[in-house]
Image (cartoon, rainbow, N blue to C red):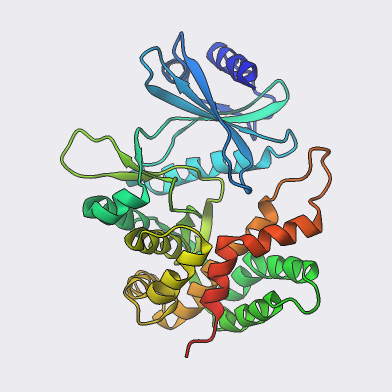
């Protein structure tokens, strides 16, 4: 793979002809030369998350400075994710120019040796870790303001949003579950909880999808203000759902405050700080929602956020090396062990 990344750098520096004008795009040669300097080395990173689809190449110049990031699908047939991320980032730059510099810029989306890749400008800084989130109030305020600043993008009928973003996943999970599995109760509770969204006109919002560690970066900044940005936009949506990103971010901050990691210790914190409608983090979520739509929809949007977060594992578990569909038993095992599924269960559990 290292050799392939070296080939990528050489090809991009020389210029890659477009095969498909609707999908292929390259920045100007000067921008590519700056992103891929002579003598650059590529540090290959393989994310360890079960849902991760990509291998990452960090392009470092002779002084060890990060100049660009290359994303390559693990599977040659899974190039839709990098196409999607490139499209989302380019649309966000048009929709929210005030966020430029706090998201990666798209430098190229092309095929090299039959494999599609994405070349992005980097965000230079440090990931917002749990430890820093617990003590750095300026960084916390910055990322909360960042999510608040994501632009509204239109309107949609809540019935359509549920039908598009939730129901297919609920049906896939139900088909996977044994007849007596207790997640059937969570599925039923979710359908009941989101019922108030049906027939209601809702604003859509630009959505990152996973604003938590390690995707939040505290940026190197010459000024006194603390600035944050977000990387990894493969889950991004131009027409997303109000509250989805804020729910994920507040959970990350709650776990950071409590100093907990792992499902068994995170669930009680989630119950106390977010699932409880009167909890402090839940009040922040309600404020975020109320600024964008009718606040009576807040409980439904909260459950929708956690159901979508949990069920995305169904789309993102990789096929086998032979290209076969994932083994249903293995998928169910991953679902049952998933931290987000545990939080979804908690979000839909009856409150006493």
Is the N terminus in the top left, top right, bottom left or bottom right quadrant?
top right
Residue located at (60% from left, 20% from top): 5
Whether residue 309 can be seen here: no
Residue located at (41% from left, 73% from top): 274
Residue farthest along the front direction in this orientation:
264
Residue 88: x %, y % from top left? 52, 45
Residue 7 occupies quadrant: top right
Whether residue 65 can be seen here: yes
Residue located at (55% from left, 79% from top): 348
Residue farthest along the bottom direction in this orientation:
352
Tell me how many marks there are. 0
Residue 149: x %, y % from top left? 34, 56
Residue 264: x %, y % from top left? 51, 66
Relative height, residue 100 to residue 270 (above, below): above
Relative height, residue 263 to residue 226 (above, below): below
Q: Is residue 343 left or right of residue 271?
A: right
Residue in the foreground of this view, choosing between 87 and 347: 347
Relative height, residue 144 to residue 221 (above, below): below
Residue 21 occupies quadrant: top right
Relative height, residue 195 to residue 211 (above, below): below
Q: Is residue 68 left or right of residue 178?
A: left
Residue farthest along the left direction in this orientation:
224
Residue located at (48% from left, 52% from top): 208
Residue 81: x %, y % from top left? 63, 42
């Amino acid at each position: 793979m290292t050799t392939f990344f070296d080939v990528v750098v050489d090809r991009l520096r020389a210029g890659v002809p477009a095969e498909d004008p609707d999908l292929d795009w390259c920045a100007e040669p000067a921008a590519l030369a700056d992103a891929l300097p002579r003598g650059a080395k590529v540090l290959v990173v393989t994310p360890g998350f079960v849902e991760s689809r990509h291998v990452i190449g960090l392009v470092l110049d002779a002084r060890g400075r990060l100049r660009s990031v290359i994303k390559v699908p693990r599977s040659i047939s899974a190039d839709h994710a990098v196409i999607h991320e490139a499209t989302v980032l380019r649309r966000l730059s048009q929709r929210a120019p005030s966020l430029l510099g706090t998201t990666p810029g798209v430098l190229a989306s092309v095929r090299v040796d039959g494999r599609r890749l994405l070349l992005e400008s980097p965000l230079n800084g440090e990931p917002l870790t749990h430890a820093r989130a617990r003590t750095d109030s300026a960084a916390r305020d910055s990322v909360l303001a960042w999510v608040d600043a994501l632009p509204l993008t239109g309107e949609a009928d809540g019935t359509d949003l549920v039908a598009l973003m939730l129901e297919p996943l609920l049906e896939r999970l139900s088909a996977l579950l044994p007849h007596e599995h207790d997640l059937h109760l969570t599925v039923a509770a979710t359908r009941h909880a989101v019922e108030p969204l049906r027939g209601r006109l809702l604003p859509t919002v630009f959505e990152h999808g996973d604003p938590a560690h390690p995707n939040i970066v505290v940026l190197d900044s010459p000024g006194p203000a603390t600035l944050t940005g977000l990387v990894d936009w493969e889950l991004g949506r131009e027409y997303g759902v109000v509250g989805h990103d804020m729910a994920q971010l507040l959970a990350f901050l709650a776990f950071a405050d409590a100093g907990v990691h792992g499902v068994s210790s995170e669930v009680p914190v989630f119950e106390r700080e977010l699932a409880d409608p009167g909890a402090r983090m839940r009040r922040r979520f309600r404020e975020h929602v109320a600024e964008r739509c009718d606040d009576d929809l807040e409980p439904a949007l909260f459950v929708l956020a956690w159901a979508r977060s949990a069920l995305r594992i169904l789309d993102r578990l990789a096929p086998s090396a032979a290209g076969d569909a994932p083994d249903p038993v293995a998928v169910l095992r991953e679902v049952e062990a998933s931290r987000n599924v545990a939080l979804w269960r908690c979000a839909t559990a009856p409150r006493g």
